[in-house]
Amino acid sequence: MNPSVPLWSEALPPPYPTFPGGTVRADIAIIGGGFAGLSAAYHLLDRRPGARVVVLEAGRIGAGASGHTTGMLGPGVGQSLVASVRRLGAPRARALYQATLRAVEEVRSLIINERIDCELEMTGQLVIARSSSARARLATLAATLTELGLPGEALDDASLARVLRLTPVPMESERGPAAVRLPVAGTLHPTKLLAGLADRVTQRGGTILEQVPVVGIAHGRPVTLTLATGGQVVADDVVVATAGYTSQLGILRGRILPVHLQVVVTDPLSADALRVIGWDGREGVLDARRVFNYCRLTADNRIVFGGGAPRYHWRGQPPATAEAAVLHQLAEEVQRTFPATTGIRAVSGWTGQIGYVLDTLPVIERLREYPAVLHVGGWCGHGVALSLASGAWVTRMLCDGVVPEDLPWYRNNPPLVPFEPVRWLAFRAVVGTMVWQDRWEERA
Ligand SMILES: Cc1cc2nc3c(=O)[nH]c(=O)nc-3n(C[C@H](O)[C@H](O)[C@H](O)COP(=O)(O)OP(=O)(O)OC[C@H]3O[C@@H](n4cnc5c(N)ncnc54)[C@H](O)[C@@H]3O)c2cc1C
């Protein structure tokens, strides 16, 4: 299956202007027109009406992960809550998870307050077990949620069967829950949201420029940004919201890795297929593997299904042939997941680039070498809620000069994997081990 444009692309607004040429002066320049960049522009203009805020986007808005996402709005970061407790201790892991819950709620409020029609459905999420070991993992997750006083409910087989019926998988032991329901979560249409957010930014006097790749960031304040189109932008402060593309700017290289994810999509499901699988609650669904699959329904009842191993390619560049093969594998996974009688199958798919940090926590802070430049990203594939909420955090940091909370993602020194081939090997080793562990446990 060759990659196609994302299903969501048809909802993109008409193009924004490109760079007018010469030198543009701004109070704040934002590099990147995805969820994070537009959220920063929106919140900064809310706080400082009349400020000269300019968003510089290399392609169209949503050209990065935000236009290619599955669109599941949910809590958590790139590591499981249980892993966070192990690494950070219970109080810090709890504070981190609570911040992500608030992020989900803030995104919901933003969409409602701004009346952005982006098919938001606050459905909750189901984390489901597809193996005995996944059931054991869900038992630990449910116990951890309870212990930390966080929202979540374990479901047994009968309760899960009432809400969702997938192809059964043989399991050696039925100990542990069949699923955990996370109530604070939902799904949305990513480009309808991007279009709405971009519109609110320009209504507030912000400028969005498309087809303007930034190629250089000078040291000092004000900061001069060099553009591939010629010309420059001079700004007092700069927000870098380029996610998986950050290393191309020559910053955080080896710390934020460009990693590729894949998604496939079905035709709208028939009434018969929906009757077989249930899914009346339309929850976002994730499985409890280490390298997990995830899926959701669209407003017209297509399934958007993501998953398979995240991929870091040599020097960050995927060969074209790799994309067709991974989409094909994911399409097979769809057929294994849903009962054969439903005839559910993937008809198209696409891939997208995210920013990945080896310790799976985001990176929000001023850069050491460029004190007037603030980086926001490193969402590790869990960025819908976080990137959309991050504009408010960035605004506090820029306007009040304070870090909003004592959380581990406010840092500018994520782990460094200095050069190839170590980078390539390290990533393949980490993901390869997780895939192998999942397969081993499912065979056991
Ligand atoms: C296939 C896929 C499925 C996903 N599913 C989910 C999900 O279900 N739930 C979830 O929470 N997360 C998911 N994610 C992750 C989530 O979509 C991202 O974390 C989020 O969209 C990141 O937003 P962002 O604005 O930080 O980055 P991006 O959307 O990548 O925005 C960065 C922008 O910067 C621009 N840019 C880059 N370099 C330059 C430059 N030099 N000059 C100017 N502009 C530049 C890019 O063109 C891009 O538009 C998924 C991601 C992918 C790829």
Image: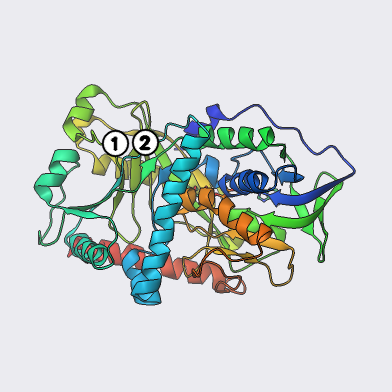
Q: In this view, does 217 lie to the left or right of 280?
A: right
Q: Is residue 225 left or right of residue 397?
A: right
Of labels 2 and 1, earlier in sequence is: 2
Query: What's the residue at 45%, 56% (across, down)?
Result: 310
Q: How crowded is mark 2: few (under 14 residues within 10 Å), some or many (20 or more)?
A: many
Residue type for callout 1:
Arg
Query: Which residue position is annotated with label 1?
Result: 282
Are the two marked residues, 2 and 1, in contact with CB atoms closer than 8 angstroms? yes
**In this view, 310 is above or below 143:** above
In this view, the residue farthest toward the top is 271
Q: How is the image coloured?
A: rainbow
Which quadrant holds the N terminus?
A: top left
Residue type for callout 2:
Glu
Judging depth in this view, the residue of 174 and 44 nearest the camera is 44
Query: Which residue position is annotated with label 2?
Result: 121
State how many labels appear.
2
Q: Is residue 272 left or right of residue 368?
A: left
Point out which mark residue 118 bears: none
**Element class at badge 2:** loop
Judging depth in this view, the residue of 248 and 309 nearest the camera is 248
Judging depth in this view, the residue of 345 and 27 nearest the camera is 27
Query: What's the residue at 84%, 37% (across, down)?
Result: 20
**In this view, 352 is above or below 99:** above
Residue 157: percent from the left, percent from the top?
11, 49
Residue 240: percent from the left, percent from the top?
67, 56
**Element class at badge 1:** loop
Q: Quadrant of residue 208?
A: top right
